[in-house]
Amino acid sequence: MTWVNVVVQGVLLGGVYALLACGLSLMYGVMRIINLAHGDLAVVGAYLVTVVLDHVGVSPFVAFLAVLPVMLAIGYVLQRTILERSLRAGILTPILATFGLSIAIQNILLRQFSPDVKSLGGNAGALTTASWRITGQLSISAIGALTLAVAVAVVAGLHVFLHRTRFGSMMRATAQDVDSAELVGIDSRSMYAWATALAVAIAALGGLFLGIRSTFDPTAGPTQLIFAFEAVVIGGLGSLWGTLAGGIVLGVSQTTGAQINPQYSILAGNLVFLVVIATRRGGLLGSRDGTQ
Amino acid sequence: MTGVAVTKTPPRGRVRRWSRLSGTSTAVAVAVAGVLALAPEFASSNVVLDLTNLLILVIMAVMWNALAGFGGMVSIGQQAFIGLGAYGTVFLVNHGQHPYIAMLEATLFCGVLALPLSVFMLRLRAAQFAIAMWVVAESLAILVTLDSGLGAGTGTSLIEFNFYEPTQREHYTYWWTLGAAVIALVVVFLLLRSPLGASLQAIRDDEGAAASLGVRVTEVKTVLFVLAALGTGAAGAATLANILFIEPTSIFSIQYTAYMIFMVLVGGLGSFEGPILGALVLFVIQTEFISNGTVYLTGIGATAILFAIFLPRGVWGTVTDRFGIQLLPVGRELVIAEEPPPEPEP
């Protein structure tokens, strides 16, 4: 029964990782770049929610509605200023530029908000403590279930958006062949900017749930980026459903490791990630190089 | 086309590897190394400590540039080897080894470990390689935290270094670091001048095209990966000897990689002299702004973005592009003798 609980808790934990990883997966799928500041942008989202909560006494979910357009704008501007230029400069420049961005964001946050650890859990009311007790050893927390449900909804929503809407088709066309997309009149720069805007907004949503479920501080971003990237690679580059599965596998790996020894939690996740890389497998659902 | 035969003799050219400027500046570089070796004789203790710091930065920058600038491998996990060099030294000293010999052995261990690691890592491309190296560094940091013999999460100090009188210890550490820096620079210099150097620059410019011309890309990259591990490991061992106290979170900190990227981007990615210049720049900035940590690091990050986008060849690369000068002769220059155009026969 203990192990059933370990797996269930791991699946729930995987919801956060999947949520944090969706945007990373989307940007990789559309532009073939990994934004190293992705985790930091999630933390920025969480901090912006605290700013709203300092002024109005609402639930973090309501406060997030005010943060959402800001994050969309940040993503759009980020693409138009930094990422677009670095994309043109070659394959290595986006890594260097987004790494610089990550360092800058962390230190701006440190300066703006203290290094103190924060949490949004206190503002979320009964939701953070509510749980369904299945048996004596197995209970499902309401916030864990909600996170996973939101992660599934976001992946499903992105899938519908990319495959059922005209705008989504244009985005996929840009991802497959940017020159041909331009030929049929698609503004690829705009497509890229909207993809990044979406990715950053979803990252902030991940930051919101991270902040409610646990804690964050100005330097929490890099760890979240590593988890998100591990989820993307375990699930298979370029596949959104794979990313959801990868997040869950990572979550279960971590809770399994923690069950053996609490200090093995992150190590176990890293190990699964390195095994996926070492075995030349393309992850659960993706192809090796991420092209589909 | 009435049968006018134009006999065109190919222009007579020769490949020039030395110029008067590069000859002079190489001599100057050797002289600088000589003066640096004598520095403890006349410089104060603070200056020796500062110079040790600077030399550690030079090693880090030169090695990260060897990896990214010549091999096209951007790693954000090179702090793995900083930590490994430092903790390897701690481990060996705990087992009775002489501290300075232990530093050397820990350095070699980094190179030995890099070889099997390269088999997995070099399959990965671009950002995947970058982050996978980071995961390796984080995992090593956790493993160290789990080992109580290495001081676990609270860190450890190397009391064996206290057997030396402080000034003497500072001097030995300085000479050790200077030796490592000179070896690192000479190895990279010779590597770039060797036949392998042309392959390196071909890979840097276009890996696919290099491979199709018969450059053995994986072998060349492995050499660079192991070299960077050795050098960065030496920088880690020297860091330990210089600060005497380490803990996993700080010695495996990604800040080291931030410094490496800053130095190489500012100095000039893919040039030989650039990283040395970058190390000097970072050294000056560190001494000026270290009291204001967050502003300083925000500036480091912002500068990295600006250089990556607007000045990808860095300060030194831009200077050489514009004026065609090269201080240390690692390249080849084609000198074409001017000849009058051949007269067409009637």
Image (spheres, helix red, strand yellow):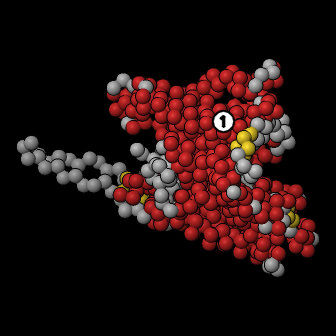
The residue at the far top in this view is A56
Residue A25 seen in this snapshot: yes
Q: Chain of mark 1?
A: A
The quadrant the N terminus of chain B occupies is top left
User: Residue A102's x, y, as percent?
Assistant: 67, 40
Depicted B110 relative to depicted A225: above or below: below
Is A112 in front, or is A172? A172
Residue occupying the point 79% across, 24% down: A53
In the rendered structure, the answer to whether residue B134 lies left or right of residue B239 reads left
Depicted B182 relative to depicted A64: above or below: below
Q: Secondary structure at mark 1?
A: helix
Residue occupying the point 41% across, 62% down: B215
User: Residue A201's x, y, as percent?
Assistant: 61, 30
Depicted A235 relative to depicted B310: above or below: below
Based on the displayed image, in which of its 4 quarters is residue B93 positioned? Answer: bottom right
User: Residue B166's x, y, as percent?
Assistant: 91, 67
Disc 1 target residue: A146
